[in-house]
Image (cartoon, rainbow, N blue to C red):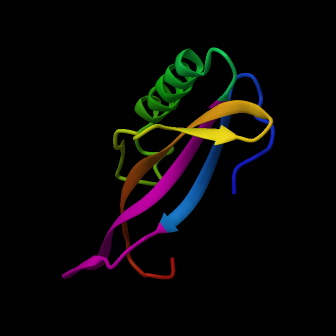
Amino acid sequence: MLPERVPAAGLVILRDGEPGEPEVTLSPLRYHYQHRAEIEAVVQGATRDVTFDTLCASIGTAIAADRTLGGLCDWIEAEAPRPVDLPVEGAATLKAAVIPVVLHYTLIDPLG
């Protein structure tokens, strides 16, 4: 569901995604995940193309600044967004994209 109003700087929504099936090593026992999450980026207004590019660049900068989330992951990488223009009845068109993000991490227990 898309918002009716978007802040001037844009809106970012993080979706948890799915961890998927882990690869397992047995000695020592470890579960290696490539968890796919999604970042939804939405902008609106007359300068939406520039605002969208700025918002995506800031997301990329934040990911590059700490690719381990403070040690919680082994590596994080984002995939390219596929932007679309979405008409909104009675309001300025939205520009939105889903930015897939892959989190690589290893656990000693799949619940942990």
Stretch in magenta: 18-43
**Residue toward you, 92 or 82:** 92
Q: Is residue 51 left or right of residue 8?
A: left
Total number of numbered discs in the rendering: 0
Q: Residue at x 42, y 54 (%)?
A: 73
Judge whether 64 appears above or below 105 on screen: above
**Image quarter hosting the N terminus:** bottom right
**Residue toward you, 85 or 109:** 85
Judge whether 62 appears above or below 17 on screen: above
Give the quarter of the image for residue 8. Answer: top right
Give coordinates of residue 28: x percent, y percent.
Answer: 24, 79
Q: Residue at x 40, y 41 (%)?
A: 82
Give coordinates of residue 94: x percent, y percent.
Answer: 64, 35
User: Residue 14 lies in magenta, yes or no?
Assistant: no
Q: Residue at x 77, y 33 (%)?
A: 91
Give coordinates of residue 51: x percent, y percent.
Answer: 59, 19
Q: Is residue 84 left or right of residue 77?
A: right
Q: Is residue 26 left or right of residue 96?
A: left
Judge whether 22 appears above or below 8 on screen: below
Q: Residue at x 50, y 82 (%)?
A: 111
**Residue toward you, 50 or 37:** 50
Q: Main secondary structure of the magenta part?
A: strand
Q: Is residue 81 left or right of residue 26?
A: right
User: Residue 28 lies in magenta, yes or no?
Assistant: yes
